[in-house]
């Protein structure tokens, strides 16, 4: 058969090298065309097709998990560490691999250059702000003082990093854009009203765009994700070392809101 029999066998073979399956067949023995061997062959072919089309469904049944849980590892944007739910998922996957010793796991790290890049830009800016505030902060600073320090640092960074035009003039224009005049009343003249929160948010947005994130950093993120996943598998069972492989990193476009999904792949191990 032109089917991936090696993978099917690896998915079915238990640690003792045995394959135990239910293979129901149906046919009319009164039919002149009836051939018992043909029915068995057809049922076996359908079984193989079903197994290799949804290999994680079989593994999930072995360990009491959802197939979609085992097939994808989800990362927080811009990060390569594994959250507790993903660690539990990998533990289930490692358990399933120990129950199917002919299987191998391939992990190819992924990166969404747009979403991961933006998250890394935000993280870089946050680190810069925290470092500069920490350098001048005291134990007596209250929340109001922190907000003032944060705005001052953002303005300082903006004047340092803006490469086009006059940074000071750009800041004044930004402040003016977030300043309005109150309506005059019988008792009061119109007063300037400055929306500090909106101003700070816009200043932060512009600074995020100015933070450099090189392609090499994004490539490294993808590789770190695959390495961390492999390490989590081996932490469950070190004997899986020769059955886990790191594949080539891949670019993805993630539309999912919950994070960046990395698909893992099952293959037949050596000799299958």
Image (cartoon, rainbow, N blue to C red):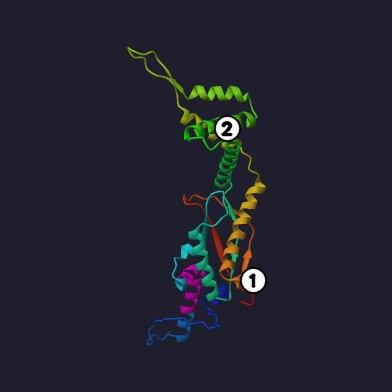
Q: Main secondary structure of the magenta part?
A: helix
The stretch of residues the image draws in magenta is 42-60
Helix or strand or loop: what does disc 2 sit on? helix
Residue 114 on image: x %, y %? 56, 45
Res. 242 mark: 1
Q: Residue at x 63, y 66 (%)?
A: 245
Q: Give the position of the N terminus as an image quadrant.
A: bottom right
Badge count = 2
User: From the viewer's perspective, is residue 86 above or below residue 167?
Assistant: below
In which quarter of the view is residue 100 placed?
Answer: bottom right
For label 1, count other residues whose C-alpha is less than 10 Å away and answer few (under 14), some (14-19) or many (20+): few
Return the residue found at the far left. 186
Res. 153 mark: 2
Foreground: disc 2 or disc 1: 2
Estimate the spatial distance between the alpha carbons at disc 2 and disc 1, rounded to whole Å: 50 Å
Residue 105 on image: x %, y %? 58, 67
Residue closer to the observer: 129 or 31: 129
Res. 26 mark: none
């Amino acid at each position: 058969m032109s089917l991936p029999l090696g993978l099917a066998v690896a998915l079915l073979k238990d640690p003792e090298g045995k394959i135990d399956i239910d293979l129901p067949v149906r046919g009319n023995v009164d039919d002149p065309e009836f051939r018992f061997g043909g029915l068995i062959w057809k049922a076996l072919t359908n079984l193989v097709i079903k197994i290799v089309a949804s290999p994680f469904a079989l593994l999930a049944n072995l360990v009491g998990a959802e197939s979609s849980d085992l097939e994808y590892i989800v990362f927080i944007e811009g990060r390569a560490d594994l959250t507790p739910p993903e660690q539990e998922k990998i533990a289930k996957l490692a358990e399933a691999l120990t129950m199917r010793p002919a299987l191998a796991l391939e992990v190819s790290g992924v990166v969404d250059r747009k979403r991961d890049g933006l998250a890394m830009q935000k993280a870089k800016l946050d680190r810069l702000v925290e470092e500069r505030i920490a350098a001048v902060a005291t134990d007596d600073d209250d929340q109001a003082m922190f907000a003032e320090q944060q705005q001052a640092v953002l303005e300082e960074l903006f004047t340092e990093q803006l490469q086009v035009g006059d940074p000071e003039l750009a800041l004044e224009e930004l402040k003016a854009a977030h300043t309005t005049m109150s309506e005059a009343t019988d008792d009061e003249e119109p007063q300037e009203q400055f929306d500090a929160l909106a101003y700070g948010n816009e200043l932060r947005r512009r600074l995020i765009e100015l933070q450099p994130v090189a392609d090499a950093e994004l490539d490294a993120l993808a590789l770190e994700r695959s390495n961390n996943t492999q390490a989590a598998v081996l932490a469950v069972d070190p004997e899986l070392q020769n059955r886990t492989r790191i594949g080539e990193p891949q670019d993805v476009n993630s539309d999912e809101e919950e994070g960046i999904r990395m698909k893992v792949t099952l293959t037949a191990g050596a000799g299958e």
